[in-house]
Amino acid sequence: MTGFSPATSRRPSVPSAFVRLRRAMGRGVARITSGAIAPYQTAVLRIGLAFAWFAFLLREWLHRADLYGVDAPWSWGMGRELISVNHAFTALMWNDGRLWFEVVYAAAMVVSVMLLLGWRTRTTSLLFMIGVLAIVNRNPMVADGGDNVFKVMAIYLVFTRCGQVWSLDARRAAAGRDGGRDVAGIVMWVFLTGVLALVTGAGKLSPGWALLLWAFVLGQAAWWLVRRFAAGEPRTVMTMAANAVHAGALLVIAVEVCLIYATAGWYKIQGTAWQNGTALYYPLHVGAFTPWPALSHAIASSSLVILIFTYGTVMAEVAFPFTLFNTRARTVMVAIMISLHVGIGVVLGLTFFALVMIAADAFFLPTAVLRWVGDRVARAVPRTRVMATTAAMAAGVGVAAGARSRAEASPKPERVTK
């Protein structure tokens, strides 16, 4: 019988589950704080939201006073009474004059373009949120479902570093002009601080919103001071904190979109019309949702098409959160959801709801896909400029040639000799 030797029976030491968990958490924290994660996804969300909001404001320009201004059936007094109950935030409740409304509406459009281009995104994202809340909360009775998504995403976008790529901020940083004095940014924040102090002193803000907005102002001031006068470890710590907040905001955005689809899908399952596959038949016969009556009636005339679209919508919404863990499955599902919302925008006329949901869907596309699309767009822009320049030159040459031919064809006056 062979003797037992403890020394020869020892196995190589294996890290415990706690040690492995701690190492994984350390790698995760390093990944989150070392840089702004998912910069392309954040940029496409920024661009999509800004474009959708600007397009919405532009479309409603002629009817702005009837929807959100002094001529609206939902009067300023009625809006003030509702806000006193639900405590919603809107800058349009600070004054009931037409001039103030026009200033806020025009400023919201300008800020949308600034955010779309990525100019001073840290400031414009905050102004974008204020503009969205000011207009949407002024009259919540004229909404198509996209208003809630607009508000939620506009709030979350403030906490992200959404100007890392595809922005004028990124171009300025690449050119080495990001560490300067930033006179434009200073002027903007000094002006906003003065307005905020005036509004707070006048009692126009609730304590919660006053605390939130002042926290943003003081945080921006601290960021500028550290970047300007304390380069080194303080700046590194603040950058790591900003990256961590950015990552948390992206997680909340992803969870929010998953909740939107999951709740929509599971609530649809409980409806009888969705269970028997006829739910999409009814909105196709409602005048408010048939911008193309011939197209709507053609779709509604096929029971098989209605059945496929009804069941397909439910299955796609319920399955969406479960496909995010695989890159290929996620890409396919995002393409399906984008196609679904394109159909909603075209067939049902819910254009801006579709646009904001497409922006939220594109947030889940892989970086390789977004970079491929960005490269194609970047290549197409110079070609478009060349074509426009060529067309302008051709038009100019044509005008000059026409003027010359007319001059040659016109009869010349006879020379009079004395």
Image (spheres, rainbow, N blue to C red):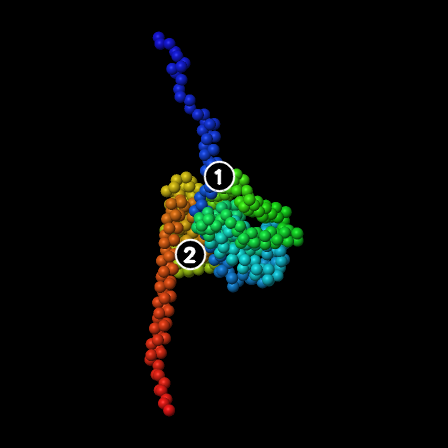
User: Toward the viewer: 14 or 217?
Assistant: 217
Q: Pointer 2: residues within 10 angstroms few (<14), some, or many (20+)?
A: some
**Gap between marks 2 and 1 measured at Cα:** 42 Å
Tag 1 residue: 33
Of pointers 2 and 1, the one earlier in the residue sequence: 1
The three-letter amino acid code for the residue at tag 2 is Val
List x then y, in percent, for residue 29: 48, 36
List x then y, in percent, for residue 406: 35, 78
Seen from this angle, which residue lies furthest front?
A: 418
Left or right, residue 379 beside residue 65: left
Question: Which residue shows up at 39% across the image and 48% down it?
Answer: 371
Seen from this angle, which residue lies furthest bottom?
A: 418
Q: Give the SS element for disc 2.
A: helix
List x then y, in percent, for residue 352: 47, 55
Question: Which residue shows up at 44% across the image and 25% down it?
Answer: 15
Left or right, residue 70 beside residue 265: right
Placement of the C terminus among the 4 image quadrants: bottom left
User: Toward the viewer: 108 or 399?
Assistant: 399
Question: Which residue shows up at 61% across the image and 56% down it?
Answer: 93
The three-letter amino acid code for the residue at tag 1 is Thr
Q: Give the SS element for disc 1.
A: helix
Which label sits in the foreground, 2 or 1? 1
Q: Which mark is residue 220?
A: none
**Residue 318 appearing in the image:** no
Tag 2 residue: 346
Placement of the N terminus among the 4 image quadrants: top left
